[in-house]
Image (cartoon, grey):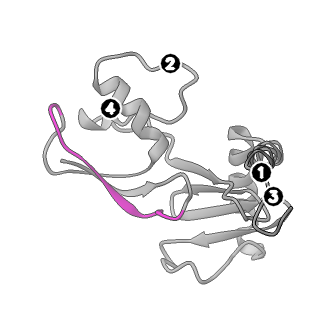
């Protein structure tokens, strides 16, 4: 089994859920500390099956971990959520002990999950953590344009809602 302690799903609610992979070519009992995301699974499965992943496919293949390779993974994981009913898109970036949550149009959150595993102490406005906020925000903005992505997601939700026809309140 290949195990990592830090799987993160697209909706960001399953951060710190272990990911276990077992099968041919996967060494039993190997533990990896790198953060990974569900988006990494598609690229991993394509490569594991012997195919070459398309260059536009997001995520990082975990296959090198199967072979004991280290140092190639960026050491961070990213996810985003645009759930219906949310007032803002949310984006999460986890790097090392830090978890940064960016809300479009609202103040962010920053947690040191090693010191604060329950994520009760928001350090976003802590002067001692401003370099971390700046670094993680810049890394997020290299991955995505949060405002543009959120606007597109909300526009798609609006189109879907309008296509569904009248609601129970008659509108």
Decide which of tag 2 and tag 4 comes sooner along the chain.
Answer: 2
Q: Nearer the viewer, mark 2 or mark 4?
A: 2
Decide which of tag 1 and tag 4 comes sooner along the chain.
Answer: 4
| Residue 155 lies in quadrant | top right
Of residue 106 and residue 152, the one placed in the foreground of this image is 152
Instruction: Report the magenta stretch's main SS.
Output: loop
Marks 1 and 2, Cα distance to the nearest angstrom? 38 Å
Q: Which mark is residue 90?
A: none
Q: Which mark is residue 64?
A: 4
Q: Nearer the viewer, mark 1 or mark 4?
A: 1
Q: Residue at x 69, y 47 (%)?
A: 140
Marks 3 and 2, Cα distance to the nearest angstrom? 30 Å
- Find numbered disc 1 in the image and state the secondary structure of the residue it sits on: loop
Q: Residues within 10 Å of mark 3 (few under 14, many from 20)?
A: some
Decide which of tag 3 and tag 2 comes sooner along the chain.
Answer: 2
> In the drawing, does residue 68 fall left or right of residue 138?
left
Marks 1 and 4, Cα distance to the nearest angstrom? 49 Å
Q: Which mark is residue 104?
A: 3
Q: Nearer the viewer, mark 1 or mark 2?
A: 1
Indicate the position of residue 83 as horizontal and vertical percent values. Answer: 66, 58
Q: Which residue is mark 1?
A: 165
Q: Which residue is mark 2?
A: 54
Indicate the position of residue 163 as horizontal and vertical percent values. Answer: 76, 44
Say whether marks 1 and 3 touch (CB < 8 Å): no
Segment tinted magenta in the rendering: 13-25
Indicate the position of residue 56 as horizontal and vertical percent values. Answer: 58, 23
């Amino acid at each position: 089994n290949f195990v990592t302690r830090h799987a993160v799903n697209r909706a960001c609610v399953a951060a710190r859920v272990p990911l276990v992979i077992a099968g041919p070519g996967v060494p039993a009992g190997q533990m990896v500390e790198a953060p990974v995301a569900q988006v990494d699974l598609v690229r991993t499965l394509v490569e594991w099956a012997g195919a070459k992943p398309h260059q536009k496919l997001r995520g990082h293949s975990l296959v090198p971990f199967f072979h004991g390779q280290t140092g190639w993974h960026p050491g961070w994981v990213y996810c985003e959520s645009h759930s219906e009913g949310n007032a803002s898109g949310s984006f999460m970036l986890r790097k090392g002990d830090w978890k940064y949550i960016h809300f479009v149009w609202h103040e962010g959150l920053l947690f040191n999950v090693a010191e604060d595993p329950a994520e009760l102490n928001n350090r976003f406005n802590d002067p001692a953590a401003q370099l971390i906020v700046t670094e993680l925000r810049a890394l997020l903005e290299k991955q995505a344009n949060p405002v543009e992505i959120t606007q597109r997601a909300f526009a798609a939700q609006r189109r879907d809602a309008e296509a569904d026809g009248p609601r129970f309140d008659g509108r």
